[in-house]
Image (cartoon, rainbow, N blue to C red):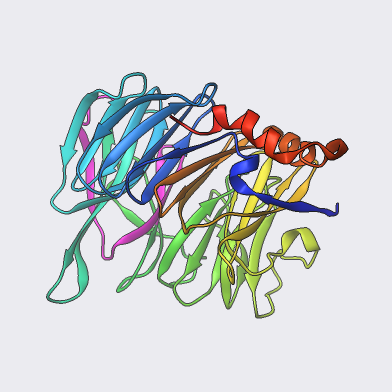
Amino acid sequence: MQMEGNHRLDEIASFVRQLPTQITSVKHDENDLIAGDKGGIVSKWCISNGRRSWSRQLDPSVSDIHIVNNLVMVASGKYLYCLTLEEGSTLWSVSFDGACDLLSPNEKTIWVTSSVYEIEIGHYVDCKVQELDIQKGVLIQSVDLPSKAWSIESIGSDCILGLGRPHPGVYFIRNRTGKLEPITDAPDLPIVESTRSVKESISFLTASGTAFEIDSRGRLQNIVDEATCVGYRHDGTWLCQSAEGKNELNVNDDFPTRLVEARFVVCSETMTATMTKSDPTKGIIYTNNLNLKWFHSGEVTSYSGNGDRISIGYSTGEIILLESRVVENRAQAEGVNGEDRSEIRARLRMLRFEE
């Protein structure tokens, strides 16, 4: 499929919204988009009409948000907040000794990582992961970690952690067992981020530039050295950018599985978006029916993919929602019959930009 045009991201988006400071977390489901910023503000917008439903001022800074069971779980400062999805009112909150960092909920419980940064030694100490009842906030188990967790993913009722120095690697924690189990197939390298495919595989990027993929049982699927970016296409294909060759596991050289100088990659079930490393104002969007180039000013600071949508947060406080069908329609409509693009933009602005 040939590349289509060069489009401003806000002109092919469903809507663009704004918070006062840098977006630190953005999440959406089929009905709502929720974003939090560095100043501790959390807001919800209705996707069908673009209107803001509610806004809350919490502790600075929001570090993670998840939507589950008509609840909004927010890590902000040293607190974990459980808010109602409909009104944003607080059902319960729990405080931690250090910063509340990362969240990973399932249907009944939520896994929460926390850490304390010790300025004098320049290192994270008192690192923990805790499992809480999602309805009441009651502590189920607390596990001390040998290093700070930089990634967390739920697998059923269990979780998988990616740890940094001084005891790096990938670990399982089983529901209610209180045990940290190393995944022996995974390299013992400091993890900097993880991403998950629609087929439940998980990819990790390490501080030394090694990227690898495991399945839901922790078995190694792929591994590549000198990687700068790792992720998935919306069809579940593993993506990895590397200057080096690869091992003999399961990577192929087909064009769709390679990244071209990408800084990030995020996918939904119907769409994949990448941002160019050399010029972070540009990128590529792949859908089932169209590939197109995009450009937009600002630094991307948060993103997520779910359903047929991708949401992106910027350092400027801007939030952009992309829907695959809308992206395709607007990208193609701009060039139809020579219709004036300024008129199209004016007609769409009422929905896309909040008063």
Q: Residue at x 78, y 36 (%)?
A: 333
Left/right placement of residue 5 relative to residue 104 reads right
Q: Residue at x 32, y 44 (%)?
A: 20
**Where 24 falls versus 249 (above or below)?**
above
Task: Give x and y (percent) for residue 336.
Answer: 84, 37
Task: Give x and y (percent) for residue 310.
Answer: 57, 41
Task: Give x and y (percent) for residue 222.
Answer: 63, 64
Q: Is 273 or 64 nearer to us in this picture? A: 273
**Where 326 falls versus 302 (above or below)?**
above
Q: Which residues are magenta?
A: 135-161
* Secondary structure, magenta segment, majority class: strand
Q: Residue at x 80, y 63 (%)?
A: 254
Q: Is residue 216 magenta?
A: no
Q: Residue at x 26, y 65 (%)?
A: 146
Quadrant in the picture for the C terminus: top left
Left/right placement of residue 316 relative to residue 148 reads right
Q: Is 57 or 225 nearer to us in this picture? A: 57
**Where 266 falls versus 139 (above or below)?**
below
Left/right placement of residue 235 relative to residue 68 reads right
Task: Give x and y (percent) for residue 244.
Answer: 65, 80
Left/right placement of residue 46 relative to residue 137 reads right
**Where 331 falls versus 259 (above or below)?**
above
Q: Quadrant of residue 212?
A: bottom right
